[in-house]
Amino acid sequence: METMVKVGPRMFIGLGTPWDDKGQSMLTHIFISYDCKRVYSIQTAYILDGKVQLSDRHGGDGFMFKTVEIDYPSEFLTGISGYGDNESGDCMMKSLTFETNRRKFGPFGTEKGHHFCIQMGTKQRLFAGFHGTSNSKYLYSIGVYVKPINPLEDTELCTSTASTIVKKEQLSA
């Protein structure tokens, strides 16, 4: 099983029901429902076994809907940020913004309240899925899974490549 770091979720963790899309790293689309006041839901499309799959929708219907298209495999998620607030006792995810290694999508919703930001790095594909809390009406919190870089694998690859090169050079001498 692949090792992953769970970051978050951010915002209203104690509300709604936990959901987990761990392992859905080959992201192709993010579907987001929102209005000028809050984010209602998020759903993603990803590649699994060579086919496009949809995650469950986390939350409900808003008044606006946007599809974020990610040019997989050359484009990948590098960060997510947003705002949440407790307006008059109504806890809400107010906005979300997604960043890739090429561009920024959003903000979806309004940038007011308490800010959060999760950056995953821009050089390698480290995103490994979303998680959070929601109910049938609203998205309350969101977090990500991050795949750590394994330098030993890279070192072993470089060592075996280097020894192969040395052996080839010795044979040809």
Image: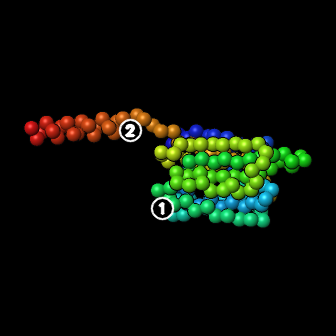
Q: Residue at x 79, y 45 (%)?
A: 113
| 7 lies above or below 130 | above
Horizontal side, residue 74 vs residue 115: left or right: left
Residue 55 seen in the current view: no
| 57 lies above or below 19 | below
Q: Nearer the viewer, mark 2 or mark 1?
A: 2
How many callouts does the rendering have?
2
Q: Residue at x 20, y 36 (%)?
A: 166
Q: Which residue is mark 2?
A: 154
Horizontal side, residue 147 vs residue 32: left or right: left
Outermost residue on the right side: it is 88
Q: Residue at x 15, y 39 (%)?
A: 169
Q: What SS does tag 1 mark? A: loop
**What x and y, as percent, mark residue 71?**
51, 60
**What x and y, as percent, mark residue 124?**
48, 45
Q: Which residue is mark 1?
A: 50
Image quarter of residue 104: bottom right
**Label disc, if present, on residue 119 of the rendered structure:** none
The first of marks 2 and 1 along the sequence is 1
Horizontal side, residue 3 vs residue 12: left or right: left
Q: Quick one: label 2, few (<14), some, or many (20+) residues within 10 Å?
A: few
Q: Are marks 2 and 1 in contact (CB under 8 Å)?
A: no
Q: Residue 142 versus residue 68: which sits nearer the camera?
A: 68
Q: CA distance from mark 2 to mark 1?
A: 26 Å
Amino acid type, mark 2? Asp
Image quarter of residue 161: top left
